[in-house]
Amino acid sequence: MQLQFILFFGVFLIILTLILVYLWFSTNTFFNITNFRAKFIFLLILFFLTWSFPVSMFIERVNESVISRGYYFFSAAWVGVLIHLIIATIPVWLVLLITKYAKVKFEIKTIAIVFFLLAIVYAAYGLWNARNVRVKNVEVPIKNLTAEWEGKKIIQLSDLHLGALYGKSFLEKIVQKVNAQNPEIIFITGDLFDGMDGSTGTLVGALNSFKANQGVYFVTGNHESYLGLNRALDILKQTDIKILDDQIIDLNGLQIIGLSYPEFGTTKDIKTIIRPGENFFSDKPSVLLYHAPANIELNGTSSHTSAYWKPDIDFSYAKNLGINLQLSGHAHAGQFFPFTLIAHSIYNGYDYGLHTDGDFSIYTTSGIGTWGPPMRTLNKPEIVEIRLVRKN
């Protein structure tokens, strides 16, 4: 895990550096900045702003405080603004090329100002949008659904990323919205914690305030491993939330399968967890909780690295078992461009929404919180309210 993290972090820093140098060069060109001292100071400012993100991550991890949280939010927000500014340079460069080769006169400085301002305003909207969680209503037909579950409300929560950016007050607002729906059951499909904050223990009271007739159930995501799996589970054990760690339970005829997200350096054989005819029955309705919108079996095993970077998207194992509904998150629907396109490509369109194939359905939520830049532009954070109906 350490080596993988170091490699990822190293690549991340290199990319950040290349991005800021590109913005520096583009801005100098657009505004015709030629003074060496001005260019050097501008470069130092960009380096300070951009490298503040990894620095603030380290500070927040080792010494959490109000100041460190504020610094972390500022630096994470700047990275989002930086990406939007990079996108804004593309049309300006196109106009500059037209001016140069088509001999058409454009005021490049004015055009750059307009696009940069638009990028900043759009990024600001993304910051606001990320904090305004909506309730998304979904209806899912289920084969052989029992009368006890017909029309009942299921709430799915995913990717809250509680920690430095999303704290106790944010969680309390989510709890109020969820409880107002009067759900039959609540499913939390991973990444409840972000892995950055040292005060996650203060969230116990709010987590214990979720109300559902049949209880609250949780499966891990990849960020529980980043926080420290034992630490995350210790927090949850202080609440009434039930942890499903590769377990199957039956609630009034509805089979709930909870699969933990694979940890670093481990594999698991799904066939030893789901045993048809022993602990799972295909003629009974079933809901699978798994953090990632991916097949739960990868050549007999499932590992953290392969599940994260090379997800299998055919869902063949769940379909062949006769599972009716899979609930996932993880992809955040990409949060903002161009990551929306990347997530859509990696998960082959299963990065968001309801998809049905025969008796199998999967709903991938955009989630509630964010990772990295605390912004969303092309999608909204959501609490998912699912109504189960009998499939004819």
Image (spheres, rainbow, N blue to C red):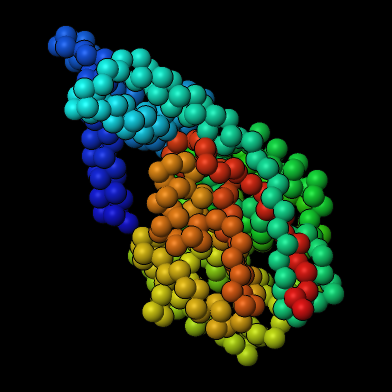
- As displayed, is residue 81 above or below residue 323? above
The answer to whether residue 306 is left or right of residue 136 is: left
Closest to the observer, 339 or 192 = 339
Q: Residue at x 68, y 53 (%)?
A: 384
Quadrant, the C terminus: bottom right
Q: Which residue is drawn at 76% across and 62% down?
A: 387
- As displayed, is residue 272 above or below residue 75? below
Closest to the observer, 256 or 348 = 348
How many numbered marks are there? 0
Q: Is residue 64 visible?
A: yes
Closest to the observer, 239 or 311 = 311
Where residue 68 sits: x, y (%)?
Answer: 45, 27
- As displayed, is residue 133 above or below residue 28? below
Where residue 254 sits: x, y (%)?
Answer: 73, 74
Where residue 233 sits: x, y (%)?
Answer: 56, 56
- Residue at the front extreme? 103
The quarter of the displayed image where residue 171 is located? top right
- Residue at the right extreme? 147
Quadrant, the N terminus: bottom left
The quarter of the displayed image where residue 361 is located? bottom right
The quarter of the displayed image where residue 85 is located? top left
Q: Is residue 164 visible?
A: no
Q: Which residue is drawn at 25% across and 45% down?
A: 11
Closest to the observer, 1 or 354 = 354
- Residue at the left extreme? 36
Where residue 242 sits: x, y (%)?
Answer: 67, 61
Q: Which residue is drawn at 36% across and 60% down?
A: 309
The answer to whether residue 366 is left or right of residue 92 is: right
- As displayed, is residue 250 above or below residue 156? below
